[in-house]
Amino acid sequence: MNVPVLKNYTGGKWTAPENHGLLDVERPSTADVIGRVPLSTAAEAGRAIAAARAAFPEWSAVPVSRRCELLRRLADRIRDRSRELAETISRENGKSLPDAEAEVKRSLENAEVACAMPVLQQGDKLHGASPDIDGEVLRVPLGVFGMIAPFNFPLMVPFWFFPYALAAGNTCVVKPSEQVPLCMARVAEFMDTIGFPPGVFNLVHGDGRAGQALLESPDIAGISFVGTSGVGRIVAERCARTGKRFQVFGGAKNHLVAMPDAKMDDMIRNMITSCYGCAGQRCMASSAIVAVGDDVHEEVCGRFVAASREVRVADPLDPEVAGEAMVMGPVISAKAKSFILDMIRTGIDEGATLALDGRNLAVPGCERGHFLGPTVFTGVKPGMKIHRTEIFGPVVVILKADSLDEAIRIINGHEYGNGASIYTQNGYYARRFKLEAQVGMIGINVGIPAPVAQLPFGGMRASLMADTKTQGKAAVNFFTDLKIISERYWRE
Ligand code: NAD
């Protein structure tokens, strides 16, 4: 098989990697090498930043409608190539084809929302702010933005950022995750052919060193980062020290609360897709269930474990399962699998009950793939390591609470606050939950409350270090600054 060696896209040119090493990109289902990604140096990242900086003055002066016209071409290209992109995502990340298709759709949606920039970027005017003085508020671009993406949404995360940044008149340098660089490499090919001026969009491959170069550069105005909270803290600190604005989307441990009046059949079905879609590697995946009351707890434990047993684990590109919505693929890497296996051992040592053990699962024909089966712990207490830690795999912990108050306390006592959902038909419970649960995104009978692109996306506490979320108007806030003008003319 011909294994492509990826190139950076800098200043409108493809640049072959310098001799600093290439990393194999693995297909998680088989461990086959499907690409080689350059580990760019700070100097290579620096050239991309310089190209973006040089392109900024001219690009920011291009009328916003023209900027959006080019973005619409990108959206058209994504729509035309959506199947190919979904297959690439599925191949490099391991998620099911329907999940990959949903990712392409959300990416496209973000590009389309960004095309509303002629409306979104409008400022304000206040006549007579003071005697004979008018006040005016302009929304202006800032310069070059750096974007650092995680492995779990190779396409969608960059699309949370760069379409808004470019539509608002900024230029950018995108660094995809070194584990899943192929689909953004394809997007760079689209960008190359649809008329964007050189340097407006740049793609730099690499690991943390290339990311670090973006953080250090004095020529970058802001950073959008998505990844683990540990790396996110480094990013936030570095940006604060070097005077950049930043938005850091960090880790998560999302809770699902089962109330006594929940519609049990619908709830269990919904919980299964929330917990095991993308092998539990969505930032909005749920991995902790809190059942309220003894009876509900007993029923949820029994039925959730039974339903988990039925989840099909397979290579997502196996034609036999390719169209099925709930197929669980592998986790991203041998390293991720080994961490998850460690956490399962930790749960056993902590005294939780391993009610379903997904270790030792074999997928015929994919013996080298990083597969794990659904795994469920019951008898879990708040504060156990398997409850505190973001395991980021198909491992679910079930806890019991005596009341809604206690369930909310468990959620609010957790370090992360990305999303949480409640299953109930009762408006009083639902209202209290939406007001009191300290998380950024709430679901009421919706197990993955990931908002559409027209609405803001982002968590709270350790799940989001930023002043503003992303998508829609929130992204416009991040990628523009306000300039306030006081204007007076003396009588002739
Ligand atoms: P990661 O932190 O390992 O890597 C993320 C990115 O940071 C990669 O591109 C990596 O190369 C880069 N990087 C690593 N070290 C760096 C450094 N010192 N400086 C700059 N960049 C550096 O995360 P991951 O494993 O790829 O992604 C999974 C994580 O992302 C999970 O914690 C998940 O919850 C989180 N995530 C959160 C959201 C959200 O909305 N909150 C969305 C998606 C993923």
Image (spheres, grey):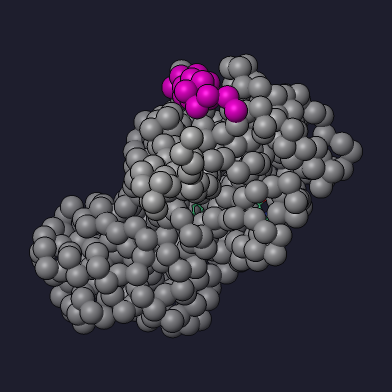
Q: Quadrant of residue 147?
A: top right
Q: Position of residue 138 (x, y in %)?
A: 48, 41
Which residue is at the far right?
Answer: 19
Magenta stretch: helix, strand or loop mostly: helix
Q: Position of residue 487 (x, y in %)?
A: 48, 44
In this view of the protein, which residue sits in the foreground, 431 or 341?
431
As drawn, 133 above or below 379: above
Q: Is residue 446 magenta?
A: no
Q: Position of residue 294 (x, y in %)?
A: 18, 79
In this view of the protein, which residue sits in the foreground, 171 or 336?
171
Q: Position of residue 124 (x, y in %)?
A: 39, 42
The residue positioned 55% from the left and 57% from the top of the image is 248
Q: Is residue 364 visible?
A: no
476 lies left or right of 22: left
Q: Which residues are magenta?
A: 61-79
The residue positioned 74% from the left and 40% from the top of the image is 49
Q: Is residue 140 visible?
A: yes
In what quadrant does ligand 1 lie?
bottom right
As drawn, 59 above or below 488: above
The residue positioned 35% from the left and 73% from the top of the image is 411
Question: Which quadrant holds the N terminus?
Answer: top right
In this view of the protein, which residue sits in the foreground, 312 or 425?
425
